[in-house]
Image: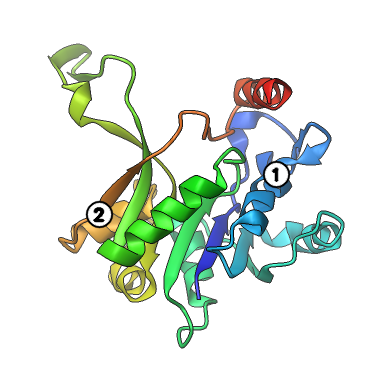
């Protein structure tokens, strides 16, 4: 069984809104339900666990049926950091039946079914795989207020989600992790620390993460263009 953990426990402070960003409306529908719609359509995903701020759980459950969320297995209260929240979602999985775990940001509504399928398939083959996109800007390494060197962007990728792993591998990665470390911003880094290979699947730059008001405006434009 393949399970998705939707990480949606953030407060969205960069959005400067009185509502968490995952519940802001995008074309009249909360962002998180745009995201969940893709997982509903993906045959490679059997169950979904959503990690939310504890105070949002009741409201979310009341809306889940309205928006046709049928794969929802459970809602889990999030922690103080992303890593803590994802670990809580991981602990809620039934280990006896788990095969691949796909971790995805709740505010990335433009991932496609094809990208999900490809990343899950790569994780089944290799144990770990993440969706990435090219770095299109020239990237500088800096220090002390100055440029140290220019990096070869041909060898660089932006990490997107989903990030997919065999269940046992992700459990092992989290066993010794300091989940209160705010620098742990993705699951791949934890698996890399085990010395394991993480395969990449090339994804689309459309798979944006909505974190600011400007991102929400871009998301509206993407939907209008579809």
> What percent of the width, then of the height, locates residue 185?
39, 47
Q: Earlier in the sequence, mark 1 or mark 2?
A: 1
- Furthest-top residue in view? 146
Q: Nearer the viewer, residue 41 or 138?
A: 41
Q: How many discs mark residues in the rendered view?
A: 2
> What percent of the width, then of the height, locates residue 80?
51, 56
Above or below residue 162? Residue 2 is below
What secondary structure is marked by label 1? helix
Q: CA distance from mark 1 to mark 2?
A: 28 Å
Q: Circle 1 is placed at which residue position?
A: 34
Where is residue 76, by image quadrant?
A: bottom right
Above or below residue 160? Residue 7 is below
**Quadrant the C terminus occupies:** top right
- Furthest-bottom residue in view? 96
Q: Is residue 127 visible?
A: no
Above or below residue 73? Residue 181 is above
Q: Nearer the viewer, residue 100 or 59?
A: 100
Where is residue 101, by image quadrant?
A: bottom left
Within-10-Å neighbours for mark 2: few <14, some 14–19, many 20+: some
Q: Nearer the viewer, residue 167 or 8?
A: 167
* Residue at image coords 50%, 70%: 2
| Residue 198 - label | 2
The coloring applied to the image is rainbow
Q: Is residue 83 visible?
A: yes
* Residue at image coords 67%, 43%: 22
Left-right relation of 177 to 160: left
> What percent of the width, then of the height, locates residue 218?
63, 21
């Amino acid at each position: 069984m393949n399970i998705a953990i939707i990480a949606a426990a953030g407060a969205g402070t960069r959005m400067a809104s009185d509502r968490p960003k995952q519940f802001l409306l995008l074309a009249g529908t909360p962002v998180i339900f745009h995201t969940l719609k893709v997982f509903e359509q993906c045959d490679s995903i059997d169950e979904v666990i959503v990690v939310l701020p504890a105070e949002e759980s009741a409201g979310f459950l009341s809306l889940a049926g309205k928006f046709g969320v049928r794969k929802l297995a459970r809602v889990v209260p999030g922690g103080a950091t992303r890593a803590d929240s994802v670990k809580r979602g991981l602990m809620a999985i039934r280990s006896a039946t788990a095969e691949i775990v796909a971790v995805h940001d709740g505010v990335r509504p433009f991932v496609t079914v094809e990208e999900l399928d490809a990343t899950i398939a790569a994780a089944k083959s290799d144990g770990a795989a993440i969706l990435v996109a090219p770095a299109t800007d020239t990237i500088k390494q800096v220090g002390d207020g100055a440029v140290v060197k220019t990096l070869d962007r041909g060898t660089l990728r932006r990490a997107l989600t989903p990030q997919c792993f065999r269940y046992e591998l992700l459990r092992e990665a989290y066993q010794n992790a300091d989940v209160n470390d705010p620098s742990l911003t993705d699951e791949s880094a934890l698996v890399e620390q085990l010395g394991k290979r993480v395969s990449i699947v090339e994804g689309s730059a459309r798979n944006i993460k909505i974190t600011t008001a400007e991102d929400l405006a871009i998301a509206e434009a993407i939907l209008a263009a579809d």
